[in-house]
Amino acid sequence: MRLIPGDEERMLRDSARRLLAGDAAWADFAEQGWLALPVPEAFGGLGGAASTVAVLAEEMGRAQVAERWVAGALLPAVVIDLLASEAQKSRWLPAMAEGTLRVAFAHVERGDGLLSVATRWDGALSGAKAAVFDADKAGLLLVTAQTPAGLGVFAVEPGGLTPYATVDGGTAADLVLDGTPGEPLGDLSMDASAALLQALDHANAAGCSEAVGAMAALLEATVSYTKERVQFGQPLAKFQALRHRMAEMAVKLEEARASALLAALSLGMPPLERARGVSGARAKIGKLSRSVAQEAIQLHGAMGFSEEMPIGHWFKRLYALENTWGSTACHLQRYGEAMRDAGLREQGLLRPGADDGGMNLALSEGDLAFRDEVRAFFDATLDPDTKRAERLNPSFLAHPPIGLRWLQKLPAGWAAPSWPAEHGGSGWTLTQRYLFDQESERAGEPHFRGASFKMIAPVLMRYGSPEQQAFYLPRILNGQDFWAQGYSEPGSGSDLASLSCKAVRDGDHYVVNGSKIWSTHAHHATRMFALVRTDDSGKKQQGISFLLIDMKAPGVTVKPIRSICGTHEFNQTFFDDVRVPASDLVGAEGDGWEIAKYLLEFERGGAFAGGLLRALYARLWRMADASGLTDDPLFMARFAEIGTDIDANDMLELTAMSAVQAGGNPGAVPSSVMKIERSRIRQAITELGAYSLGPDALRWEPHRPLHELPVEDALAEDRKVASAVYINARSQSIFGGSNEIQLEIIARVLLG
């Protein structure tokens, strides 16, 4: 698996951006080899990989290119390669690669289906086609029609065309066929439907990348404009309401980029999985790009509505892309059918396949063997009582006694999938960690890897002394220490710079006074990592230090805070002259702010969440199917939308974790984007799950923990906990820094 662009992709991006900054024409495309890119090498082409095609398509979208490279070069080349005879390929493909033959694809009719074709072949062609892009420039038309065997494709000399301008500044034509002769591509006795879908998937995947390029350009232009445009005495970029709207644009762009990459890398997969990747991306990017384009117009004000600004062109280009080769609704329906028919709801994105060295989602034989090993372990070891306790747990973390008991059953290193082997972790590859996440959630493993494994451990590995690492990391692994987080304070919330809990140096100790709030599972914790103020002079951030506190030390008091879903997760922790050894200071005094930011990146984006979201999604399907909702088109549309969100999140996680695998950290913006999107997806799943209850949504079981109640069948227990899960999920967009704080983090990177 490789998800990071390599030298070939980077070189193509840079050269394309330089050329497309000018007035590039079709002849320039030929000279650069771009017309040869989708043509197989055997016929004078370059046989470019899907990821390479995606790079070029994105640059086309960014540059406002009038020429339709996807429609005029990529799509016809794929259709001919899939369907034409060897003689036909030899006749047309080399000329297309050289730029001496332009081909237009005449397929679209007055219907929304990808293969909605009424045109017929009865020895000649009769019917009508719409939106034949650049037909007036073509020397050959490829026309789809119904035949006795199914769909076929025919080569037709141009004629019967009514050209017109398109909304995005290009040209298209309507085509009337009335006894028009045509040359069949390949074997006329074969139904070409599957090949046509495959070719359209190639075009739609490239269209997704083109849309990403336009979205990126819109965001860049909007950021630039709001930095320069002064209103009420200051740049528009200083107004928080506008900053957050641009941050939302950035979130949507990152989601779209992840979806477009998934579409490109799905092209070599079997049909249903290809449909999932491509149509899922088309549906999601259609919605996202519309939002970004509309926001760009709005944030430019009246100037955004003027032809003097380039905004309008990108806006109209995205509008055109959303209505090309299937509408957003059409692709959403296709995605939903793929998820239903293939049972893909519980399956992640990686698939068996050979690693060709390019960007891919391939699983090797070794990866598959690892997955089978993990699956076999969970099947044999995860007992029904533990699985039931987790299924009936409305919280985002396992009940600590359940989680710690399960910890003792795990093989060495399995408790810490993301830890390096030298610290007692698994030392697994990124692919193995992804597979482990998917399999553990599929099996119903308790969510015990909270603050201990995912937050304080990475901090100790990065900033801790050798002595701290040697003492604390083994105790985390064996469950001897269970950690709580001490960040927020009453009156401070997400404003960590304003915290006031003080630690005063007294010889070999610090004396801590103050309190922390929302400290998850502090009533079970043996330790707390806390931000404390060691200096009141200078900037507020400079006086913060990072301290490790023994929760059994004299002067520590924990007061429970009950959640509205009925659980006891949160607490307020009080410190009254608590003495903490100076050896439990992490880093130096004043390093706390830097350490805190690093830790929060791991809290928000340092681990996979896709497996959990997919497990919740599969549970939602089971509940809805039992209620008959899976036959409801409105439910299925919303269900499919959430599925596209989960797939995009998986790609975001995989690309961000690639940075961690390489020795870095997730990055502030990717971490914030993932934190926002994970919370929104989880809330959307649980909301739809609560909706599926019907009148039973009014029932409430006050007893906690729910796993202490008498056993019922699994579906009844899923329904019993669904309302509490929905209510608990409201916390997802608040803790770990609210989504509004995440938008401000993104805005600072964008706007300063």
Image: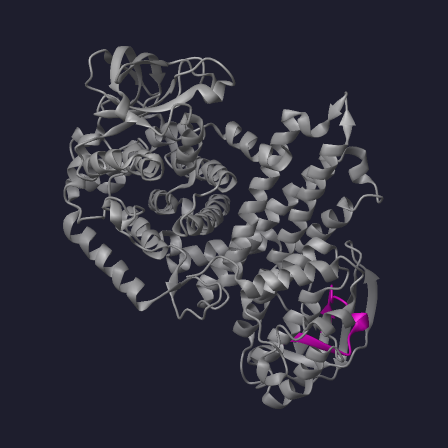
Give the residue drawn at x 22%, y 38%: 470
Question: In this image, 148 relative to 372: left or right?
Answer: right
Q: Residue furthest top?
A: 576
Give the x, y percent position of residue 406. Answer: 17, 40
Give the residue drawn at x 76%, y 64%: 67
Give the x, y percent position of residue 696. Answer: 34, 30
Q: Residue furthest bottom?
A: 87
Give the residue drawn at x 17%, y 46%: 410
Quadrant holding the N terminus = bottom left
Q: Is residue 437 magenta?
A: no
Compared with residue 456, is residue 165 higher up or lower down, i.e. above or below?
Answer: below
> How many discs mark residues in the rendered view?
0
Compared with residue 164, is residue 232 higher up or lower down, i.e. above or below?
Answer: above
Question: In this image, 664 relative to 375: left or right?
Answer: right
Q: Is residue 44 visible?
A: yes
- In which image quadrant can residue 405 be found? top left
Choose between 425 and 64: the one closer to the eye. Answer: 425
Q: Residue furthest front?
A: 507
Q: Is residue 130 magenta?
A: yes
Choose between 357 and 580: the one closer to the eye. Answer: 580
Magenta extent: 127-146
Give the residue drawn at x 48%, y 13%: 537
- In which image quadrant can residue 270 be found? bottom left
Compared with residue 162, is residue 181 higher up or lower down, i.e. above or below?
Answer: below
